[in-house]
Each structure stands twice: as C-alpha cells, then as structure tokens.
Image (spheres, rainbow, N blue to C red):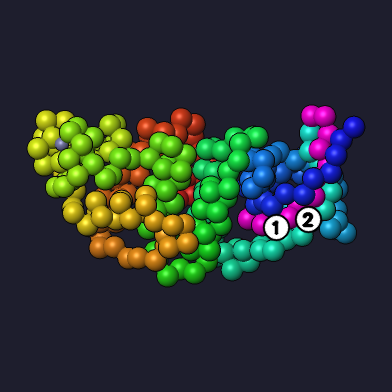
Amino acid sequence: MGQQITVTAMVLSATLVGDYDRRIVLLTKERGKVIAFARGARKTNSQLLGACKPFSFGQFTLFEGRTTYNIMSAAIDNYFETLQKDLDSIYYGLYFCELCDYFTSEGVEETAILQLLYQSLRAIEKKTIPLDLVRCIFEIKLLSLFGVGMQVFSCVGCGEKNDLLYVKEEEQGLFCKHCGAVHKARKIEESTVYTLQFIISSKLSSLYTFHVSDTVLHQLKAITKKNRALHIEKKLKTIDFLDN
Ligand SMILES: [Zn+2]
C-alpha cells in the first residue's frame, strides 16, 4: 500500500513522457532529491500544467508507491516569473538546477542546498550583482555545503592563519606566503581571499550582498572553473549556454 506525503520542493527538471505525462526531478526539503511522475501534466486543463516546470517552488503532494512517486497536487508559492522573462537568467537558473541535481541524492536531507538554490534564483531575479558573480558565489557555496569546499581560513601546508596569498584547487585550499611557492600554488589578491572566506562563512541570506573588482571576479572565475573540472565528472547539459 502506498501513502500520501506533502513535501516542500523545487522542480529541478521536467522531461516529457508519453503524450501527456512528465517525469519531474524535485529537490525536496524532507527527502532530498525525488523523482516523480506527473500524470496528465501536459493536458491543458491539468492543475499540474504550470506547477511541473523548472523553478516552481512550493508544496507538492505525492503518492508514494512501491517504486515510484506520483504527483497528486501542488500549491506553488513562487514560479520565479521575473527570472523567466529573461533568456540569460533562464540559462543561469537551469544551470544552477542541473548542478543541484548533480550534487544531491535521494533519501538525504538537503535543506541547505534547497535554500541556497532558492536564494540564488532570487539573486538572479534581483540583478543587484552581476550574473557571473552570482554564479561564482553559488558554485563556491555549493561545493562547501556538499563537503568538498576549499580550506580558506588556514594554510593547507602548515595551518598558518595569516598571509594566505596563494591558491591551489588540486589541494582544495589556500597556502600562506611561505608554503605557496613550495606547493607551486597560484598567487591571488588579498581581496579574493576575503571574498572566499566571506562566501564560505556567510549565512545564505547574506550571500548575494556584495560587489567585487574586475580582478577579484576574474580570479574567482578561474578558481570555480578549476573546481568544476575537479569535482564534476559528467558533461552538464546547460553549461554550453553559459560558456559560449
Ligand atoms: Zn603555510
């Protein structure tokens, strides 16, 4: 016998199945990633027509069968309509959803990652900081929440807390002025170090509140690019949109 459950979730992706159905990947607060089917969701009179699209955030009532979930109904709080009016914003949003899909698992509580995704889509909508900076912040925080973030408060080589001026992604962190050369690490600006420390230690609600210089942004992009190569093994579908 199955049972009915209600979860708070965001739709990460929706693919077509058959003539009228959709297969939905949900990031839920309660059960991590959940794959669910929305029967008849593409019929024009379906209550699920709008709900079962990427970015829809709200309460989903699911019927939990032996092997699959079916979406019974949804009460959407936020469709991120402003984001959906701009093509660049949509690409960034879909990319963030795909990264969350990649890093999350079924049956694991993923509240922080769901909150990060929500705040990041809000940052895309608000446009108070540039989208490429939003992307850097999102990626650095995501890896940190996922447990593969960089060590940015002390030297990876010796534990020194001051004069951290070098980075080496392969060693997952920063190096002090003495160890940097020994480990063939790359020199970065002091303000890039502060930015990394702020992103990793800051609450999710204050993540998207600062601007950086062009030099710092350039260095953050180089760091996130290397980290993607190190931590993401498959080719993401949405990455070409952003990088071309
Ligand atoms: Zn050191």
Specify the segment rendered in magenta.
53-67
Q: Which mark is residue 58?
A: 1
Residue at the disc numbered 2: 74
* First along the sequence among labels 2 and 1: 1
161 left or right, relative to 9: left
Q: Quadrant of residue 68?
A: top right
Amino acid type, mark 1: Gly
Calculate the distance from the C-alpha at mark 2 to the C-alpha at mark 1.
Answer: 7 Å
Q: Does the magenta portion include 140?
A: no
| Label 2 Cα crowd, 10 Å radius (few <14 / some 14-19 / many 20+) | many
Q: What residue is drawn where x is 67% and y is 40%? A: 31
Q: What residue is drawn where x is 22% and y is 57%? A: 191
Q: Position of residue 171 (x, y in %)?
A: 28, 31
Amino acid type, mark 2: Ala
* 189 w.r.t. 228: above or below: below
Tell me the quadrant of the picture where the N terminus can be found.
top right
CB-based contact (under 8 Å), mark 2 and mark 1? yes
| Label 1 Cα crowd, 10 Å radius (few <14 / some 14-19 / many 20+) | some
Q: Position of residue 120 (x, y in %)?
A: 50, 57
Q: Position of residue 170 (x, y in %)?
A: 29, 31
